[in-house]
Amino acid sequence: MAPGVVDRLLVFREALAALGRYQSTPPSSWESDLVQRSALERLLQKGTKALIDLGTHLVAEKLLPKPRRAAEVFEVLREAEILEPALADKMKKRVQFRNIIIHEYATVTAAQLREALTDLTDLAQVATILAGRLDLSTEI
């Protein structure tokens, strides 16, 4: 396996662990702190991007149709029956939020960040599925 693929999985795992710490912290401790909110945004961005990269690698490895945009990666994986439809839809929403963080950063609200932190199991499930399909299960 290409070293970059393993690196992406490690980046994801680090981001998920840090997001978990924010998840167990009262929002009042980070909502008004620019540095903490910026860190949270970056962790969400990195974690989502790592899954996009892993998904893109799997799409290429399985010779699936090439997605034109990041959100389409998870649609292609759904159509290939690698991801359940509900999970693919959640990931498409995560990618959309990642795009807001990157391109519309001035509009990101504390409420959006709280919602993104509410449940991280979708991210963990996708990582487990992708790692298994990429034969990286031992790396998790």
Image (cartoon, grey):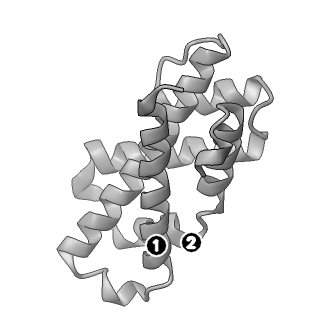
**Residue 36 is at least partly visible in this image:** yes
Q: Which residue is mark 2?
A: 118
Q: Which residue is mark 1?
A: 114
> Residue type at mark 1?
Arg
Q: Badge 1 local density, few (<14 within 10 Å), some, or many (20+)?
A: some
Residue at the image point whose x is 31% and y is 80% from the top:
31
> Residue type at mark 2?
Thr
- Residue 27 on image: x %, y %: 40, 84
Residue at the image point whose x is 49% and y is 56% from the top:
13
Camera-side residue of 106 and 27: 27
- Mark 1 and mark 2 in contact? Answer it, CB < 8 Å: yes
- Residue 140 on image: x %, y %: 60, 52
Which quarter of the picture shows residue 67? top right
Tell me, for residue 129, which label it has, or none: none
Residue at the image point whose x is 61% and y is 25% from the top:
58
Q: Secondary structure at mark 1?
A: helix
Camera-side residue of 107 and 86: 86
Q: Secondary structure at mark 2?
A: helix
Q: Badge 2 local density, few (<14 within 10 Å), some, or many (20+)?
A: few
126 vs 19: above or below: above
18 vs 101: above or below: below
4 vs 93: above or below: above
